[in-house]
Structure formats: C-alpha cells, structure tokens
Image (cartoon, helix red, strand yellow):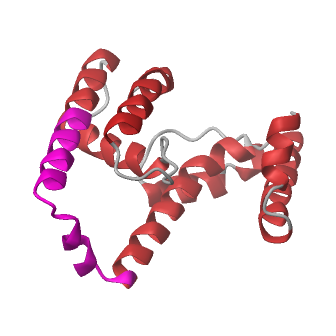
Amino acid sequence: LVPVQVGLYALPAALILYAVFGSSRQLAIGPTSTVALMSGAVVAGIFGHGDPQRAIALSAGVALSAGLWLALFGLLKLGWVTAFISRPVIVGFSFGLSLTVIVSELPHLLGVPVSDVHVTQRIWRTLAELGEANPATIAVGVVGLVILFVGQVRWPLVPWALILMG
C-alpha cells in the first residue's frame, strides 16, 4: 500500500520525537512489523489497494491519531490498564503476527511469484508454485535462515556481526 521509502523517511523524525518526549532512557525503539501490519490493515480496510498518495495520507492520519491517543493516555497515566491484558493474549497476538509475517515473506524468500491474497490462499499458492522456484534463491534463503537462527540460539551477537561486516 505505502512505499517502504515513506517509512524510512519518517523514521528519523519519530526517533527524535521519542528522544525528546519518551519516558524511558533504556527503551530501544524502531519500525516494527507489528506497527506496519496494523497500520496497513487499517488503511486497507478503509481504502483498499489503489493510489499510493492516498494510502500515504491515510497512513499519516493513522499515525497522528495513534500518537495523539497515546499522548492523551500518557497524560492521564493510563498505562496501568495494560496490566489487564493477560500473558496468553499477548503471546497469542505475537505468535499470530509472527505467522503472518512469515507467510507474507516466504514467497520472496523462495523466489516464488505470489500475488497479494488472503493469508491461507498465499500459503496454498506458495506451495503450489514451489516447482517454479529458483533453486539458487531457495539455497540463499535457507542458508540465511540457518545463519540467523543458529546465530540467535548459539551466539546472540552473530547476526549483528554479520550485518556490520557486510
């Protein structure tokens, strides 16, 4: 919906604003797939797929609206409300979000052409198109995943070292 560059251009301003108005000196923030998926779902629900300029305007509106609500909640000291969200709900949401991101990125990782469709349809289309996948693309994707996962489990700083070296 919204070109990736828009988020990258907006990120420095958001980081500076958080540095000025944020409440925690130790919190690490940045763009996340959660925010992207939630914003994309709102924009797609209102607008569907079409003109990127309109999607950008709607995304900006969603971001400003969310920011105003969060500022209001902060002023009213309503952070305690999050204590009522149970751990299973948070884990379930995070797991579902992880699956959504994996399913949306899997065709790119395998080099399989799949159009934007519902998550379950994307899974079936990806599996159906595996015969068309480029073996070199699959090999690079699998090696990258192995390095990422083994590095996270055995040596937590290995992926960062690879990123900084590369």
Q: Residue 2 at what x, y percent from top left?
A: 39, 27
Q: Quadrant of residue 145?
A: bottom right
What segment is highlighted magenta in the picture?
A: 62-87
Q: Residue 50 at what x, y percent from top left?
A: 30, 23
Q: Residue at x 51, y 53 (%)?
A: 122
Nearer the observer, 94 or 40: 94
How many numbered discs, if any? 0
Q: Residue at x 43, y 46 (%)?
A: 117
Q: Is residue 69 magenta?
A: yes
Q: Image check: 43 left or right of 19?
A: left
Nearer the observer, 131 or 142: 142
Q: Residue at x 44, y 76 (%)?
A: 91
Please say if 20 is above or below 92: above
Please say if 40 is above or below 103: above
Nearer the observer, 136 or 39: 39
Q: Quadrant of residue 59?
A: top left
